[in-house]
Amino acid sequence: MKNKFYFPSYEEVVKAKNLLKDIIYETPLQRNSLLSEKYQANIFLKREDLQIIRSYKIRGAYNKIKSLSHIEELKKGIVCASAGNHAQGVAYSCNILQLPGKIYMPSTTPKQKVERVKMFGKENVEIVLIGDTFDAVSYEAMKDCKKNKKIFIHPFDDIKIIEGQATVGLEILKQSNDHSIDYVFLPIGGGGLASGVGSIFKQFSPKTKIIGVEPQGAPSMSYSLKKGKVIELKTIDRFIDGASVKKVGELNFNICNRVLSEIKTVPEGKVCTTILDLYNLEAIVAEPAGALSISALDFYSKKIKGKTIVCVLSGGNNDITRTEEIRERSLLYEEKKHYFIVKFPQRAGSLKEFVNNILGPKDDIAYFEYSKKNSKEEGPAIIGIELADKNEFSGLLGRMKKYKVHFQYLNKDPDLFRVLI
């Protein structure tokens, strides 16, 4: 059923809550002192990263599958397509309910998420890695369903999925002890969490502003809202894998159109900085999609001053092998790492002169690639320089010009940057 005017009812969400009570955690709503002090506000984190599968996705997946338990076709198996967290929710549900499941995941899914799907599903689940995006994987999963008459469990565009995710909203309202919540920041991928939680607040706390937060490289909901209908993006940045879809759900779009106060796109580099800060300052492991809501706070610093804020930290399934990429993206966003093509005179001592004359006392050469060509007067090198303070960049450029260094700046040349770095 895809009812354009569907709005999750309180009664159905309560049913979902009761159905879920024995298989999920009621995750804490924790006041964060560092963020509260930084923004001079009362900021709480809804810790869905502490859920049994380290993500809220178990709520919708189990609610949907359990609601179908009377259908004979379930015995043929269920199918889902997911970049990771929905897959874990479906796998966990299959294991609890002893149902056969087939889970399609993009080939680009972090290994950590694939291994956790195997762990939760045990012998009840088969994993198929195929394609590069959720949308490609979804197409293959739907083909399987039609051919073999299995049941497809959609990650977001489904009434029961939305009602399951809406239980996060019920918990927030209960845990807030009737304190007025001024803003709720929610990550958006396909829109399941935002439409579910947003619908609960629309009914019971209508003055609360609901802010949807999307990756800048995959702004499918914000683009669709601007156009007034669901639009499929041609290309997306898949880095924030848990929230990067080309096309949001029809149900989700229609609900979000009614419940969102605003929608904000956040650069992937900003999200990376948030991930590192959460880990280094709070010992919180957040995946990129999980950190989205907190990443938006900088852009609302004036509006939220003195207010009560809830950010849903939606997932903690981060792969440690991505740490270096996360750090790199953060440094580039914070303007603390800069890449150049430098043409060195091909004579002894030229690199030493560069280090002595150009680099500041706390600067570091983090990347260097050079190939000497004996028949040339100059030889190009690719150099990555990491600064202790982004404000030192102007001084670095000034010294390069003073000493007549021939260089080309790569950070502002995305095409050349992608090829060379």
Image (cartoon, helix red, strand yellow):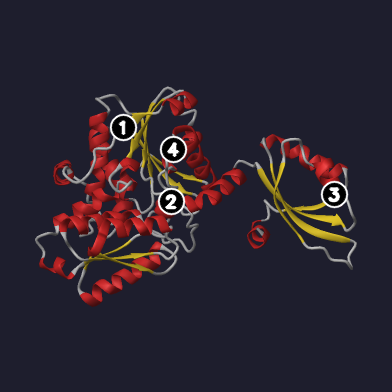
Mark before the other along the chain sequence, 4 or 2 = 2
Assess whether mark 1 and mark 3 are in contact (beta carbons under 8 angstroms): no
* Rendered location of residue 319, percent (x, y): 44, 52
Amino acid type, mark 4? Ile
Please state if 341 lies on the left or on the right of 132 as rendered: right
Would you say residue 296 is visible in this rendering?
A: no
Q: Earlier in the sequence, mark 4 or mark 3?
A: 4
Say which quadrant the C terminus sits in. bottom right
In the rendered image, which quarter is residue 66 located in? bottom left
Tag 2, which secondary structure? helix
Q: Which residue is mark 4?
A: 294
Q: Secondary structure at mark 4?
A: helix
Is 59 placed above or below 369 here? above
Q: Is residue 322 left or right of residue 316?
A: right
Mark 1 / mark 4, whichever is N-terminal: 1
Q: Label 1 belongs to which residue?
A: 29
| Amino acid identity at mark 1 | Leu
Residue carrying label 3? 405
What residue sits 34% from the left and 51% below the top?
191
